Image (cartoon, rainbow, N blue to C red):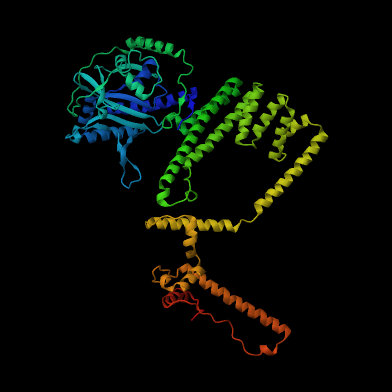
Amino acid sequence: MPMKKFRMTNTELKLKRERLMSAFRAGKMAIEELGLPYFLANGSALGALREGQFQPFEDDIIVGIHAWDLAALQRACPEPTAARRDGRMIGVFTRCGFDPVSEVVEGGIAQGGKKPLTESACPRYFIAEGWTQEMAFPILYKFTHKESLVRFDILVFSMQFGQLWDFADGGAETSCGWRYSPFAPQPMEFEKMMTFTMPASALEEHYGQDWHVPRAQSYIENLSRCKNRCQVLRVLPWDASLQKLQLPSVPTWEEFRLLMRTYRIKYAKAMADAEHEVPAKPLDLYKIESKPLVLFQAAELCKTDGNERLKKGNASGALDKYDEGVYIMDKCREVLVTWRLIFRQIHNEKAENNRKDRGLKYCDMVEPDMPREFRGDETQEQTFRMALLLNAAQASLQLEMWEAADARAGLALELDSKNLKALYRRGLARLKSDREELAKADFWSMVRVSNFESKEALSQLMKLMPKEELQKQMKKVKVSLDKEHKLGSMITEMEGDDRISMQDERYQRYLADCSQRKADGQREISFDDWARQYEWRYDADERNKVRQAWPDCFSHKGAAPLPVEDWEVDYLTHKEIHKIMYNRQTAALGAKKREKEGSRPDDEAPRQEGFECKLEVDEEDEMVLRDAVVKRGYNYWW
């Protein structure tokens, strides 16, 4: 489904780069603990060389290692096997705050048939037919930094046929790879720490001579522009005895610093005509910057920065920050709405596909509720939006931008029509813009919402209205509020309708029967059909009538067995007890009445206390009643 286009704000760019740097520092610490020489590769190297920071549209950190260094790590293990090598790498990265990545297998279903099949991508191997597991070539290790949610990818560069090869990006799975002239890692200073990167010559082979010019292109378009992507004729099996090879020398950091300055000047010139550092584009729900958690962090930064500017008297700068936060919340709302539509679309597709087979009506299919975390995200989005709009209205008032203050307070009132701050700030904006009647309406709304406790609203009304008129209007408002309170109390104190609870109980019985029918492999039925055909089974009187009408079918051992349940026995027992109590009370009242009025001739004959009652059951049901009722102490029939 098409999504609106958004650009990344300055706060989002700052936050994302901080997350990328956090993941890089943790990954750098893990690689150095393993003793593996490394270098920034591909997009990470591109950002480090031409911008001095990671590119904001990247979702992962990419580093490269040479195959002979990985082989040396394997040989250093107590057991020089591939499993021990990979286990050591995963263990070190786990201690540094990473999780190994698992990827969904296309078309695969896990055991049980409910979840898709996944396989570990840490590492991802290339293995040919006839190879053993020890011969499988590790082409990529994938980790996810738990704190920042940034992925950390380690590419394994192998020397084959006199060239350095990277098989990871689509690589050996598509019989293609990236071919580079042999290069050694280039030392450089990056974010006030020394690290290593792929040299400019390798970037030129990969991205072309104009690699320093930023381009906003899709992944497929970038593949078509790459100069070093070519067919892989053969991938050699993994060799743990691989030794270090001689690579070309590289300049020192002091010598390379001057070259890097020229790269960044070219990049700055290319960016001079761009309106935004990252152009507006449709949201990608699976990217880091589209996650509600990240958007809330960016909105919190905007709110905090705006509050600090407002305290220092920089109302204009504060308003810019608040508006930026509202823009981020617009993006968050688009993400949440899109996810809601996706959930509904999935539900509707399942309903349409299964409707004929299951014989269900649409009214019987309940749409699954949104996941709990999405409900919380919606509430948090409204909370952030309300705070940012209220602060933006206050900053607009300080700047005497009355129309802007009115608009922002109005948006806040759309979220909560009883918000006192929004009513007051909109009232002030309207008052300053010579709209007194509208301002009075906002102040009177404050009075009603606060139950006459808003001093600010009363103070403003005293300035706008004569004292006698104000008192008269106050009495009218009080009378109106009293009527509303009485009506509200009458509605809230009304007893609940028993019919609602009865219908809920019926529906729960229907759902229970549907679950049982599904477990038995029977066809599901609608609520109307269930009420017509099966609901009588929950009524003791109806069950007794059915047994009497069709004893051959609905006896204990009939074609459709209908045994006497425990709850049915209790019901019939209490029903008979109520009859006995009623007759005894009637007889006692009659005796008192005769005692007052005196005896009559026809009352001289002795009367037998109580009444005779016989429960009509067959022999087997009688045995059940004897065991279930007589043992409890009730002996009214025998």
- Could you say where residue 409 lies in the image, as x and y percent from the top left? 63, 30
- Which residue is pictured at 75% across the width and 32% down the height? 461
Residue 603 vertical position relative to residue 495 in the rendered view, above or below: below
Left or right of 61? Residue 625 is right
Give coordinates of residue 548: x percent, y percent: 47, 73
**Residue ID at (57%, 77%):** 580
Which residue is outermost to the front? Answer: 356
Residue 213: x, y in percent?
Answer: 39, 14
Answer left or right for 384 relative to 423.
left
Q: Is residue 79 visible?
A: no
Q: Where does the image place residue 471, in percent across and percent down from the top left?
A: 80, 37
Would you identify the image quadrant in which residue 413 lies? top right
- Between residue 112 and residue 155, name the one nearer to us: 112
Decide if residue 371 is in sight here: yes
Left or right, residue 396 beside residue 249: right
Q: Nearer the viewer, residue 513 or 381?
A: 513
Instruction: Identify the image quadrant of the N terminus.
Output: top left
